[in-house]
Amino acid sequence: MCVHGVRKGPLMNRHRDRRRRHAPATTAYPRSPSSLPGDVDPAALFGAALPAQARRKLDQLSRQVEERLALVLVGEIDDPHVSSLTLLGVEPEPGSGNLVVVLALPAGAGGGEAQLVMRRLDALRPYLRAEIAGAIHRKRTPNLVFRLVPAPLGRDRDEEVER
């Protein structure tokens, strides 16, 4: 017995350690069946496959960014070099927070045109990210990486609209 007739013991101590005990995070990749020669594990090179929900969310983000960029590139930018580009798609870059924006140059554009367009896209990057931030509801706006490809052969813009 203690002072005031209250007994102290293990039952009186109400403090509990509520922190969860987790196993330390590992950087090891799960071993997947090797399909590359020389016993190279693809998971070690490219990372493990994403869970279905994470993949769905990345696809959703890519579609939202693609829709907003299509509107901005066509209607809100007065630069004829940039507005003449065709948006082919937006893809997540594996293992990072970047989105790869694939743009097609107009038919007959040369290497000098591609360099000029890349400089102008780099200058527009903050504006495009701000437009994307307003269109998506995420904590962080993804970084944009631009990739220019030549115009698809045998297709014209009018043919794409008719389909």
Image: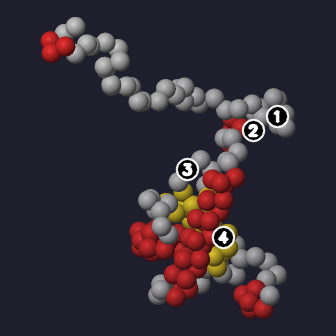
Instruction: Residue at 22%, 7% (x, y): give it.
Output: 1
Tell whether label 3 touches label 2 (CB within 8 Å).
no
Q: Residues within 10 Å of mark 2 (few under 14, many from 20)?
A: some
Q: Amino acid at mark 3?
A: Ser
Instruction: Residue at 44%, 69% (x, y): give it.
Output: 133
Precedes in sequence: disc 4 or disc 1: 1
Tell whether label 2 touches label 4 (CB within 8 Å).
no
The image's colouring method is secondary structure
Helix, strand or loop at mark 3: loop
Q: Quadrant of residue 83?
A: bottom right
User: 61 or 157: which is nearer to us?
Assistant: 61
Residue under numbered circle 2:
42
- Image quadrant containing the C terminus: bottom right
Horizontally, residue 36 falls left or right of residue 68, namely: right
Residue under numbered circle 3:
96
Precedes in sequence: disc 3 or disc 1: 1
115 vs 20: above or below: below
Precedes in sequence: disc 4 or disc 2: 2
**In this view, which residue lies farthest toward the left?**
3
Q: Amino acid at mark 1?
A: Ser
Separation (CA) of disc 2 from disc 3: 18 Å
Q: Residues within 10 Å of mark 4 (few under 14, many from 20)?
A: some
Per the rendering, the mark at residue 34 is 1
Separation (CA) of disc 3 from disc 1: 24 Å
Helix, strand or loop at mark 1: loop
